[in-house]
């Protein structure tokens, strides 16, 4: 039996593929490379000794998805494949709704048609918006402030309804802020264009692709005036997916929602300082206006992850930045970096 990983060449998907392999599972990866690179699949094959089955499939294509379930002995699905850029989703909402919701419905329909019951879904803490208090637990009110966020909110609802109607067993994982890379430095985050997210931007400053960081807002009501997030090592996050599958294998039923975070908040300036320690020199920055739509502070209540999945994050901010830097330093242009001459 195998686990189907949609979007398995992406940042979180690729790290989860490695963690699944380490847990002894067979993995079938699909990706259409709309926001990822075939070089990620090559790197994955090196990391897992060539054991991956890979198919270049767009999971909004029902016939292609059906064939995956016919051709492979799939008993669980981890569904990552989605567009994820907040600002782009505001400019191209229909493209985001079409892609992200179509993918979720198509994959779930195929599961129902082929009697596959177990699903882990890639959701986001973005569904909490600006929380009334911190830490946020899974019972907090949810909604969204942009089309990307709505596709996660609606994706969760689609799976809740499918679980109730068709007996699927589903874990909805709400990610906080994933950063870092596999310690091998072979796989990592490779954003297209100028990064929107903090750590990829900082790392491109560190390798000289960008001049300096702009810190969005220095007047928040926090100890250094910058906003607080719950940064989680992508390998911890990947292991959270394995823990979710383990829980499903052990008999977890219905539809569970679980935060994946560390329970610890860090300010933007604390991340910038940790990046400076990892890189070996200070990261130049200036403080500018707040970014519209940003929340002041959010971090996870991690008790449900511990009780339902038996999982907790173990890696701290310095390890996240050191690992992210190893990847970026050896791949200054991401997966497009030419291999070193032997
Ligand atoms: C963002 C998205 C969120 C998405 C997540 C995916 C927004 C409003 N939210 O979360 O929906 O799920 O990415 O990873 O876009 N920062 C700077 N300078 C920069 C970049 C970021 O100061 O150049 C600050 C931000 O203001 C924020 C923190 O760094 O305080 C983290 O930002 P980011 O990495 O973009 O994550 P989120 O905004 O938390």
Image (tube, grey):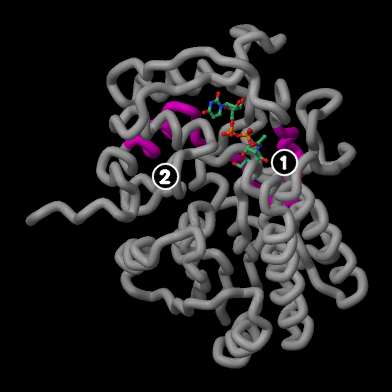
- Residue 156: percent from the left, percent from the top? 80, 57
**Residue 260 visible in this rendered orientation of the protein:** yes
- Residue at 49 percent across and 53 percent down: it is 11
Please give the name of the residue rendered at 79% of the width and 50% of the height, measured from the top-left corner: 150
| Residues at marks 2 and 1, CA–CA distance in whole angstroms | 20 Å
Reply above or below: 304 against 219.
below
Q: Residue at x 37, y 19 (%)?
A: 283
| Closer-to-camera residue (44/35) | 35
* Image: magenta residue range: 300-325
323 up-or-down from 57: above or below: above
Disc number at residue 181? Answer: 2
Q: Is ligand 1 within 8 Å of the beta carbon of the residue shown at mark 1?
A: yes
- Ligand 1 shown in quarter: top right
Q: Quadrant of the C terminus?
A: bottom left
Answer with the quarter of the image where residue 167 lies.
bottom right
Badge 2 marks a residue whose secondary structure is: loop
Percent position of residue 297, x then y: 71, 23
């Amino acid at each position: 039996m195998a686990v189907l990983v949609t979007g398995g060449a992406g940042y979180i998907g690729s790290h989860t593929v490695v963690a699944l392999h380490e847990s002894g599972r067979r993995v079938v990866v699909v990706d259409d490379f709309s926001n990822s690179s075939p070089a990620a699949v090559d790197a994955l094959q090196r990391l897992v000794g060539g054991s991956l089955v890979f198919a270049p499939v767009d999971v909004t294509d029902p016939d292609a998805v059906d064939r995956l379930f016919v051709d492979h002995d799939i008993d669980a699905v981890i569904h990552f494949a989605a567009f994820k850029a907040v600002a782009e989703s505001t400019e191209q909402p229909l493209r985001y709704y079409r892609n992200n919701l179509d993918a979720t419905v198509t994959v779930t329909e195929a599961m129902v048609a082929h009697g596959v019951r177990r699903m882990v879904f890639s959701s986001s803490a973005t569904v909490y918006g600006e929380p009334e208090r911190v830490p946020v637990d899974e019972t907090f009110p949810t909604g969204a402030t942009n089309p990307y966020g709505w596709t996660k909110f609606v994706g969760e609802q689609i799976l809740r309804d499918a679980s109730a109607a068709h007996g699927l067993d589903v874990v909805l994982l709400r990610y906080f802020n994933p950063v870092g890379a596999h310690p091998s430095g072979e796989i990592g985050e490779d954003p297209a264009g100028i990064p929107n997210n903090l750590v990829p931007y900082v790392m491109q400053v560190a390798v000289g692709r960008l001049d300096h960081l702009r810190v969005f807002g220095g007047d928040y009501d926090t100890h250094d005036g910058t906003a607080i997030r719950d940064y989680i090592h992508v390998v911890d996050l990947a292991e959270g997916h394995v823990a979710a599958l383990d829980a499903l294998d052990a008999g977890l039923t219905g539809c569970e929602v679980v935060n994946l975070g560390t329970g610890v908040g860090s300010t933007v300036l604390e991340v910038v300082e940790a990046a400076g320690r990892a890189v070996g020199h200070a990261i130049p920055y200036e403080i500018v206006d707040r970014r519209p739509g940003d929340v002041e502070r959010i971090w996870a209540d991690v008790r449900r992850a511990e009780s339902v999945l038996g999982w907790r994050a173990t890696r701290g901010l310095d390890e996240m930045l050191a690992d992210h830097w190893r990847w970026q330093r050896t791949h200054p242009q991401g997966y497009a970096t030419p291999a070193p001459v032997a």
